[in-house]
Amino acid sequence: MRHFLDLADWSSEELMRLIDEAVFLKKEFRTGGNRPILQGKSLAMVFQKPSLRTRVSFEMGMQQLGGYALYISPNEIGLGKRESIADVARVLGGYVNGVMARVFAHEHVTELAKWSPVPIINGLSDYNHPCQAMADVLTIYEEFGQLKGLTLAYLGDSNNVTRSLLFAAAKFGFKMVVSSPAGYALDEETLDKAAGIGGYQVVQLVSDPQEAVRNADVIYTDTWTSMGQEEEAEQRRKVFPPYQVNYPLLQMASAHTIVMHCLPAHRGEEITDSVADGPQSRLFPQAENRLHAQKAILVQLLR
């Protein structure tokens, strides 16, 4: 049984085939629509956290491929509370062909995978966000026509998105420069895991955000305060302003540099309107690519 929980679980060749498939499915969709290659297939979408992009992209992806997606709200299951995760996994596996889960604790999605008779897709956990990283890689690949040799500078809180981007860098052969405040950097276990895949040269930690973006092809940021960290918001607003992606910072990079953000954005905090809506922004093509990257994953796991 194959699941999509972590980019580190898949080989570089397998992941590149998924990107190629996403490119094909996107082109096919825009030139008459996708073939119904998932006709008769169903996907349960289990949500502990609310979402705009995750729900709509998976639901529309299944529909456009001829399948069906069922939304299950947090109150309907109470994953691990009202009913054990092992029982939920086995019950859902009797009804549907696959499960996408957007959870708080990564252990919940790995426990689903342990017991599920059908593929599990990690729609987000506190540890990582592999579907977002695949959409990001697709966006970068479309922009530059390559991945190897590029440099992505990530500014701000080193979180689940940062971790998946680093594993993507290790798998696809680009370099990642990470600039985070003290106390908000990537953990040693993650750095060692990425180095084990792509070598220690895959990541560079740079404290000065202006220095971090100097040779970047891509500048990437995320919200300073993620869901579940709301009680830290005031403190984080004091720490993170030097890492804001704004026009003066963008001037430190190259003219060809693009800006990315996984959204939702807190405009005026981690990114300014002038950058988010400017000519170097790829925020909305990036958001659209969630649909196409996930279609490739769905086809691989469910067909």
Image (cartoon, rainbow, N blue to C red):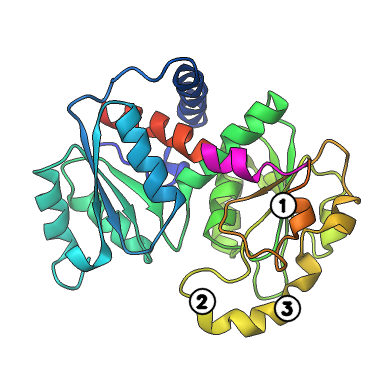
Q: Which residue is drawn at 72% across and 44% down?
A: 281
In the rendered image, which residue does mark 1 sit on?
Answer: 276
What secondary structure is marked by label 3?
A: helix
- Three-letter residue code for mark 1: Ala
For residue 32: magenta?
no
Label 3 or label 1, whichever lies nearer to me, is: 1
Query: Looking at the image, do the residues carrying marks 2 and 1 touch, with CB atoms under 8 Å apart?
Result: no
Q: Distance between the residues labelled 3 and 1?
A: 21 Å
Mark 2: few/some/many CA within 10 Å (<14, 14-19, 20+): few
Q: In this view, does 146 lie to the left or right of 40?
A: right
Q: In this view, does 21 lie to the left or right of 191?
A: left
| Magenta residue span | 280-288
Question: Measured from the top left, where is residue 294 in percent x and y?
Answer: 42, 36
Q: Vertical placement of 298 versus 55: above or below? A: above
User: Could you say which quadrant of the image residue 104 lies in?
Assistant: bottom left
In the rendered image, which residue does mark 2 sit on?
Answer: 229
Disc nearer the start of the sequence (3/1): 3
For residue 284: magenta?
yes
Given residues 11 and 252, the one toward you in this image is 252
Disc nearer the start of the sequence (2/3): 2
> Which quarter of the image is occupied by the N terminus?
top left
> Which quarter of the image is occupied by the C terminus?
top left
Q: Which residue is drawn at 49% across and 21% down?
A: 30
Q: Vertical placement of 56 versus 300: above or below? A: below
In the rendered image, which residue does mark 3 sit on?
Answer: 239
Label 2 or label 1, whichever lies nearer to me, is: 1
What secondary structure is marked by label 1?
A: helix
